Amino acid sequence: MAFTGKATYSAGVTLPEIAEDVSDLVGIISPYETPLLDAIGDPLREAKSTYHEWLEDSLVPNKDTIDDSSISDPDGETSFDVANGDRFRAGDQIQVADSEELMLVTDVSDDTITVVRGYAGTTPENIADGQVINILGNAALEGGDKPATRFTNRVRCGNYTQIFTVSVEVSGTNIAASHLGISDEMDYQKQERLRGLIRDLENTIISGGQPAANPQGSASVRRSMRGIIPHISTHVYRPGDSGFPSGDDLDESKINYVLRQIWENSSGNIDLIVVGGYQKRRINAFLSASRSFGPTDRAYTDMVSIYESDFGVCRIITSRWVPQDAVLLLDSSRISVLPLAGRSFHFKPLASSGDYECGQLIGEYTLEFRNEAAHGLIRDLAMS
């Protein structure tokens, strides 16, 4: 049937043209979706203070680096300096990264370790300043005394809450009048302003920062939370970094490189890759070379929603609020967005001093971002 511009029920009926025909719906064109908040989900608890704290811990490190530029006999040196001598004990088997040689630590003095080269029949290989040393494990003596106690200190981490608010004001006439598409102007304004606040919450969760001084806030300093991007410091990669795959365009080698680095250096389980529109198209292009269609196919699919790698299965989320040059690789089990107790988004009616009704939408939230080393960030990617 050809398009006539008429509603089906009135087709063929001879009626005068209607002067104004407005559907009883209001279309919202401004973007307000919050895919990251939807993926993280509701928190299991509330924040109890404007500074929300949590504890983090780690195992005793089993990696270090050679910190000795004076090595003169690379394949025969039996004593050299390391960056952190307190990570080593006599009896440790150690191995330089990408080397087959095993060494046995026989003595530790400050940051200088003495070793047996070519331990267990392995062949000595060259060592150099800056190389990574893996500590395989300690071989204790039978009947020996207990070793010195080693432990790590729990670290108190935290983030401040941030108040999100907007006012709503509707005149008495506007409340009384009948409107197209809505039944209650005040309720409609509440819903619209709330959509905007939730949009701003996701935007802040991703990129928001804290003031350098007085982050707790004062009469003249606004309290704000630190978002995901400012939190990540360990696994941040940019084109040109040593070891990072070359080129400015996002490709599979870059995603896999970061996933592998996080897997090797933390217990993080990356399950979310969050990107903007351009980088999402780059991820979709991973399959372009192998995509095929039959002669009877009528649908063209060009979308990757889940990325399965050796280091985890990741949902891919497209958010308008992620910087276009960035890719976030997140462990969602370590992320929570918490309201301050009794301060989740709500409407507070205010006294009116005239012919209008008014109030305020208020919410106070913070981001709990545990173990920043379990997450990753790629920046400075090409955007066109």
Image (spheres, grey):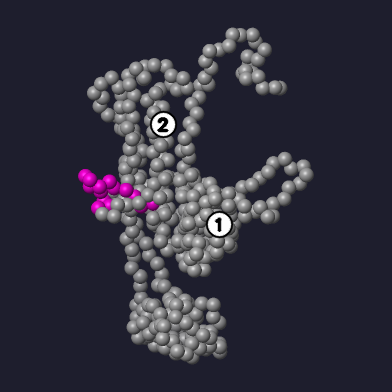
Lower position in the chain sequence, tag 2 or tag 1: 2
- Position of 235 with respect to 279 (left or right) is left
Amino acid on which the number 2 mark rests in the picture: Gln
Q: Which residue is mark 1?
A: 249
- Taking the image as shown, residue 282 lies to the left or right of residue 343, namely right
Residue 381 x, y percent position in the rendering: 51, 56
What whole-number distance in Å separates the C-alpha atoms at marks 2 and 1? 40 Å
Residue 311 visible in the picture: no
Percent across and percent down for residue 181 are 47, 22
Read off the magenta span. Answer: 214-227
Dot 1, how many residues are within 10 Å of its Cα: few (below 14), some (14-19), or many (20+)?
Answer: some
The residue lying at 44 percent from left, 77 percent from top is: 130
Q: Main secondary structure of the magenta part?
A: loop
Q: Secondary structure at mark 2?
A: helix
Q: Is residue 218 magenta?
A: yes
Towards the viewer: 326 or 143 = 326
Contact check, label 2 and label 1, Cβ < 8 Å = no
Give the residue at mark 2.
191
Given the current orientation, which residue lies at the most extreme right position? 295
Give the label, 2 or 1, closer to the camera.
Answer: 1
